[in-house]
Image: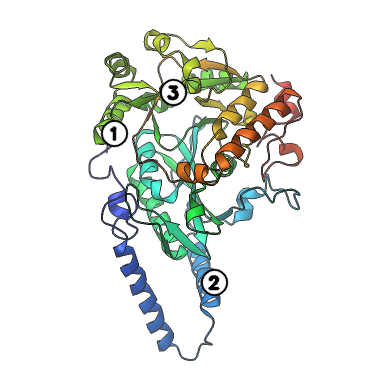
Amino acid sequence: MGPFNSSRWCFCAVLAATLAVACGTGLRQLQQLEQQQQQQQVLLQQDQPQEQQLEPGILLQQEQQQAATILQHEQQPQQQQQQPQSALDAPYGCPGKPNTADLPALKIEQVLKTKKPRQPTDVTLVTQLSFERLYMLEGQCDVWSGVISAAVYIALVKGRAVVVELNSNQDPMLVSMELVEQRFKEFHGMAESKGQCKLDLQLVSQEVESVWLSALYPVNAMRNRALAGVETEVVLLLDVDFWPSVELSELMLKPAKYQSLLAAVNSGNAIVLPAFETADSGDIGVEVAREVVLEGKELAGPMFWDGRIKAFHTDRYSAGHRATNYQKWVTAARPYRISYEEGYEPYVIVARKYVPWYDERFVGYRKNKVVHLLHLAQMGMQFIVHPRAFTVHSPHPRARTWKVTHKTGLWDQLATLYHEVKVGLEQNTYVPEAMYSCGRHVLGPQLGSTAASGR
């Protein structure tokens, strides 16, 4: 099937029956399903009176352990495996790392790897998202034929998962983590079978104090988890609500094109993908975004001139993508070099070994990607715009994290933190605060003396 096939365009239609996430059927069905599961558990316990009656929390813990053991046993012959957290963290783990009280305390619940064969020319799209946005990841999987390494976040309140229905006035609800893990696995299987991508997924949780604070999304910590799961030399750093043009992944299937890209990024270059958004912020905008990423630059140019698409957020935050020079890109036939300016935050293709860890103190909404691009620029990274490939934002409801960042006063704190990082970079004393930042990996997954000397 081709990209964006109508029979599978929105996975949220599949999830709606049980999770009611991102669709309009409400969360009542989820409560009913969970009540049915609880009733089944009660009947099962009644049928087995010889077993010791345990406290609910202990019983749930044992059931989860038993389910994990069975699942691992069943999946041993397959390439898709659920791996323990230590397997992912081992290369970068920081046992006994001090001063982590201010960092998100994330726990990897599940790791699901692609069953599809990997290729030497694979480029990994690195992204992160909250659980209710899985349908956005499906969109990326429909247009990207390489690997996607995605970290999926779910907040917990007293061990119960917080689920949210997008674009709804309903309050978030608490459900069992078992149900979330079940739907997570189902999504991976669906995306693998119907999408083009090779999908590596992590389900990552964090215990928070309240449902309201669950909206403080630990974006940079999630980016690090996705980055740690990468197995390729080249990565595309992209947010989940952006679709890359199909032509880009098609080019990577050609060994000569891949080798040219590899040489460019290994020379310390970041390949910029011009980022667009649609003029319409609703369903029409989604259709426009879908059409332009499928058709490529031949359609993107005319759409840019007639206003159907525009440079991303130039009317809200011009520094974010101004340096890309969109007018030049529309007619460009060759790559062109641009100068970094503070605040620039493009989506880039880079060598994995040159990517520093994201600073995990940046949570919520502000400066989280800007500070990372500033760090790349201070390291000496050069920015070159791809003459054909681009990415387009898919319209969606605003996340809760923006409001909570303001209400908690974190908005001003993040501005102060950004200033402190900037001073540290100027004085050459800055090291990103991250759980993985230690030892020879202090600046990133593979960045060390050998990488630095290769510049």
Q: Circle 1 sits in a helix, a strand or a loop, which is it?
A: helix
Residue ID at (44%, 34%): 146
Residue ID at (44%, 23%): 254
Image vertical order of residue 12 relative to residue 348, above or below: below
Residue, far bottom = 50
Image vertical order of residue 154 relative to residue 121, above or below: below
Residue 135 visible in rendering: yes
The amino acid sitting under disc 3 is Lys
Residue 230 visible in rendering: no
Q: Position of residue 32 (x, y in %)?
A: 31, 69
Image vertical order of residue 179 relative to residue 317, above or below: below
Q: CA distance from mark 1 to mark 2?
A: 42 Å
Mark seen at residue 254: 3
321 or 153, which is in the foreground?
Answer: 321
Q: Quadrant of residue 274?
A: top left
Report the residue marked by disc 2: 61
Report the residue marked by disc 1: 286
Q: Earlier in the sequence, mark 1 or mark 2?
A: 2
120 or 138, which is in the foreground?
Answer: 138
448 or 417, which is in the foreground?
Answer: 417
Q: Nearer the viewer, mark 1 or mark 2?
A: 1
Residues packed near mark 2 inside 10 Å, few (<14), some (14 to 19) or many (20 plus):
few
